[in-house]
């Protein structure tokens, strides 16, 4: 059976817990990185074998990073070693999940989105799954990313809070990075909106209508992801989870405030994009009115002239001025005078 597909319909009739990758395959081969740390030691092992990715030794904490979700055998082996339910592994492989949080007896499972703003002014998102266990944290990415590079750098500091705290604090740090990523995207959206506003008001260059529509679509997609994300962080910040300490809950409440701020900013930008579209359409109407004004002036000038020319263009044999020597220049002078008036 093909375990890689783009459609959910291919899973119809399969037993629950069957791992089928839903989405685009973004890496040729899945990789597995392991970070072991405690107060005195820190180590990063890249591209390790699945047999080496089990729970850590006593006294250590482990951060497991899986990049690439199309390898169902790798997911199954990691799931067996860490005691992850098959339904969770099924959700991890399905990259069309909305942000959510699930509580199990031994771990917390969270699905989030990693947003990116590409060079061609497109906002994209990828699924990131996180599992908090008593002995560590597991993250599952669609492809390698530098989004967690600041967290790795902080782990390398033996005096930092990450090294001296439990896995729940690392879990918070990863969520915080993913949430703050939205601020970077919103800043670029604001810059793009400012450029489009100027382009719409000046009315020069390429039409911004397509870019405005794309920006409106991107903000709509962001809104669909941020609203459930706010619920996820809000649930985690309640302090009802035995694996999250009360001190870490305070930081999660701060992240929850960030999600509210992001949601409010998105709503504000959506209203601004709608206003920007109205400004652009009004600008088009104003420019069209200017063109019509010029055409009306030209038509006003030529209507009486056309009337005079039409009279003398009639083919009657007996017209008073037809054989007059000065008839032609006099008629031209009269037409010039009428146009001037």
Image (tube, rainbow, N blue to C red):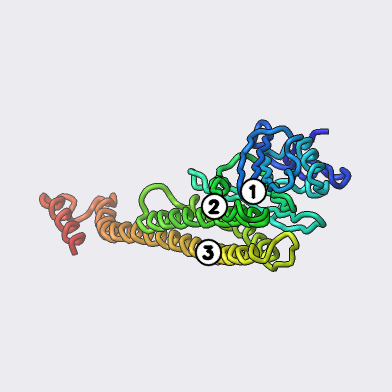
Q: Residue 339: horizontal and vertical position, in percent?
A: 21, 59
- Which of the two marks, 3 or 1, is nearer to us in this view? 1
How many neighbours does mark 2 have within 10 angstroms: few (below 14), some (14-19), or many (20 or more)?
few
Q: Which residue is mark 1?
A: 38
Which one is nearer the viewer's eye here, 212 or 16? 16
Residue at position x 83%, y 46% in the image? 86
Quadrant occupied by the N terminus: top right
Q: Tell which circle, 1 or 2, labels the residue nearer the N-terminal end.
A: 1
Q: Which residue is mark 3?
A: 265
Q: Residue 55: horizontal and vertical position, in percent?
A: 75, 44
- Which of the two marks, 3 or 2, is nearer to us in this view? 2
Which one is nearer the viewer's eye here, 49 or 164? 164
Residue at position x 35%, y 59% in the image? 292
Question: What kind of element bears circle 3?
Answer: helix
Q: Identify the image quadrant of residue 79.
A: top right
Question: What kind of element bears circle 2?
Answer: loop
Question: What kind of element bears circle 1?
Answer: loop
Residue at position x 70%, y 42% in the image? 23
Q: Tell which circle, 3 or 2, labels the residue nearer the N-terminal end.
A: 2
Residue 211 seen anywhere in this rendered image of the structure: yes
Q: Identify the image quadrant of residue 333.
A: bottom left
Q: Which residue is mark 2?
A: 159
How many neighbours does mark 3 have within 10 angstroms: few (below 14), some (14-19), or many (20 or more)?
some
């Amino acid at each position: 059976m093909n375990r890689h597909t783009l459609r959910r319909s291919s899973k119809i009739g399969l037993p629950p817990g069957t791992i089928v990758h839903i989405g685009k395959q973004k890496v040729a081969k899945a990789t597995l990185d392991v970070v072991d740390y405690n107060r005195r030691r820190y180590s990063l092992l890249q591209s390790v074998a699945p047999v080496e990715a089990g729970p850590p030794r006593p006294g250590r904490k482990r951060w497991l990073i899986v990049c690439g979700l199309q390898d169902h055998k790798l997911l199954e082996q990691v799931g067996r070693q860490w005691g992850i339910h098959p339904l969770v592994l099924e959700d991890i492989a399905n990259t069309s999940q909305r942000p959510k949080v699930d509580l199990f007896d031994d771990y917390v499972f969270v699905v989030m989105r990693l947003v990116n703003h590409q060079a061609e002014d497109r906002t994209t998102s990828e699924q990131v799954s996180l599992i908090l266990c008593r002995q560590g944290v597991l993250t599952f990415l669609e492809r390698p990313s530098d989004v967690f590079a600041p967290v790795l750098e902080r782990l390398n500091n033996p005096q930092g809070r990450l090294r001296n705290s439990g896995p729940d604090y690392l879990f918070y740090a990863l969520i915080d990075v993913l949430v703050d990523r939205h601020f970077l995207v919103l800043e670029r959206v604001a810059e793009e909106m400012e450029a489009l506003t100027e382009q719409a008001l000046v009315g020069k260059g390429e039409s911004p209508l397509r870019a405005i529509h794309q920006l409106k679509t991107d903000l709509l997609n962001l809104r669909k992801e941020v609203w459930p994300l706010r619920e996820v962080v809000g649930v985690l910040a309640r302090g009802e989870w035995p694996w999250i300490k009360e001190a870490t809950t305070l930081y999660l409440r701060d992240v929850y405030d960030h999600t509210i701020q992001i949601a409010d900013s998105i709503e504000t930008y959506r209203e601004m994009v709608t206003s920007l579209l109205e400004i652009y359409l009004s600008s088009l109407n104003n420019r069209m009115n200017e063109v019509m004004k010029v055409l009306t002036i030209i038509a006003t000038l030529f209507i009486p002239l056309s009337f005079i020319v039409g009279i003398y263009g009639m083919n009657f044999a007996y017209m008073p001025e037809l054989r007059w020597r000065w008839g032609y220049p006099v008629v031209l002078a009269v037409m010039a005078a009428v146009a001037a008036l």
